[in-house]
Image: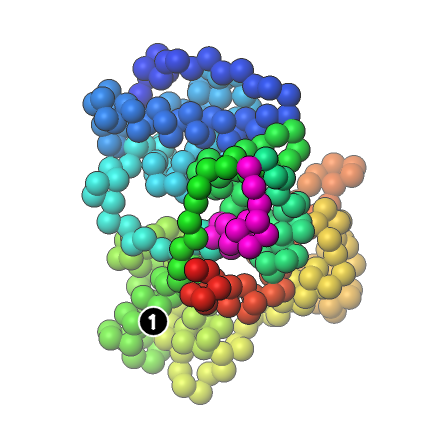
Amino acid sequence: MRRIKLAEMAPHVHTFLPNENKTDKLAKWLIAWITIALQGEIIKPYDLLPLKSELACHIGVSLGTMQNVYRILEDAGYIESKQKIGSFIKDRKFDNIEKLTSKKDLATDVIKKFLKDNNYKKGDSLISTRKLSEITGVSSATIRAAVTNLVLQGILEKKKNLYVLTGRSFKTHNVEAKTLVEKVAENIKQYVNDNLKQNDRIPPSTELAKMFNVSVKTVHDAAKLLAKEGLLYTRRGRYGTVVAENSESKTTSYHYEIIEQKILAKISSDYKVGDKLSSIKMLSKEYKTSEKTVKKALDNLASDGYLTFMRGRYGGTFVTDLPQKSADAYTWIAINSDYLN
């Protein structure tokens, strides 16, 4: 695999206005550059992009900004990242990944419908992402990702701290109210029904990921959904994840999973984004369990995007997202064709 050199990416001098969103601007530039470079055969599919650290230094932005740029391009299907290899240009002509609807795609279409229903015109400012989250019942993190998506599509542009309608025409689409995780869960369920019986061990996550052409994390999340339905049961040690017996309850959970749900409910009812959670010691006393169990529950919630940990004198565990409260209403908006047309 050939690594693209920085010199090939000219012009690469970028200036940023005060309050201009660097991530959005660089993502648009890089998407345009990849498209033109592929058409001109300057680069080929599977060529490696420069290291994020090198490109960030060359442009004069932080590594975090460049990581966000690469993440946007990966979500848009222009690049793919592999651990210990790097980020390479995807061959979009032969992209055999099933086209699935993400939460971001659903939220993007709901925002488009909101703009049309409320007669937004060119130059009108979008209401805050927090307010949109309240109206749609979608998490604020997903709404922010959808707004960024609309900026990349040229429907919105950021001016100072506001997102403004550009006047570019757009259409809403009927989309399936199923996320990638939900569809992979259906695929795994079908595989289990066709090939396995009770107490059989399902293939490793890496094998399932290759089978369905998705990430290992997506398989893990799909398996969690099936465990809640009672189809799968995760055992400790070498036993792995097996097909559950009919007699097993779908609510079978480890103790830390029960504590995880209790903390999640507490976050939903008592906390806002940015609030600091009680200490592990206090939570262990509140739920009458060990600090180790609480730590495991918090780690899981952090991996799901609800919490983040900060060190230092003013550190602790902070809320970064709230559980979706109006999932049923949002699903109706996403799947009702009369509403979307």
Q: Is residue 341 visible?
A: yes
Judged from the image, the secondary structure of the residue bearing numbered disc 1 is: helix
Please report the bounds of the magenta region as a residue range.
107-122
Nearest to the observer: residue 124 or residue 309: 124
How many numbered marks appear?
1
Q: x and y percent of residue 271 in the render?
A: 74, 56
Residue at the image position 65 percent from the left and 29 percent from the top = 160
Find residue 258 and report its image quarter: bottom right
Mark 1 nearby-residue class (10 Å; few <14, some 14–19, many ≥20): some
Magenta stretch encompasses residue 112: yes
Three-letter code for the amino acid on which mark 1 is drawn: Lys
Q: Is residue 267 above or below residue 127?
A: below
Q: Position of residue 2 (x, y in %)?
A: 25, 24
> Residue 297's quadrant in the figure?
bottom right
Q: Which residue is mark 1?
A: 189
Residue nearer the viewer, 115 or 183: 115
User: Looking at the image, is 305 positioned above or below residue 50?
Assistant: below
Please check the rendered image and state whether residue 287 is part of the magenta-colored stretch, yes or no.
no
In the image, is residue 324 above or below residue 233? above
- The residue closer to the viewer here, 308 or 333, is 333
Q: Residue at x 55, y 69 (%)?
A: 328
Left-right relation of 241 to 191: right
Q: Position of residue 56 (x, y in %)?
A: 49, 21
Q: Is residue 107 visible?
A: no
Q: Residue at x 63, y 39 (%)?
A: 125
Left or right, residue 117 beside residue 226 = right
The quadrant in which the N terminus is found is top left
Residue at x 35% of width, y 68% of height: 186
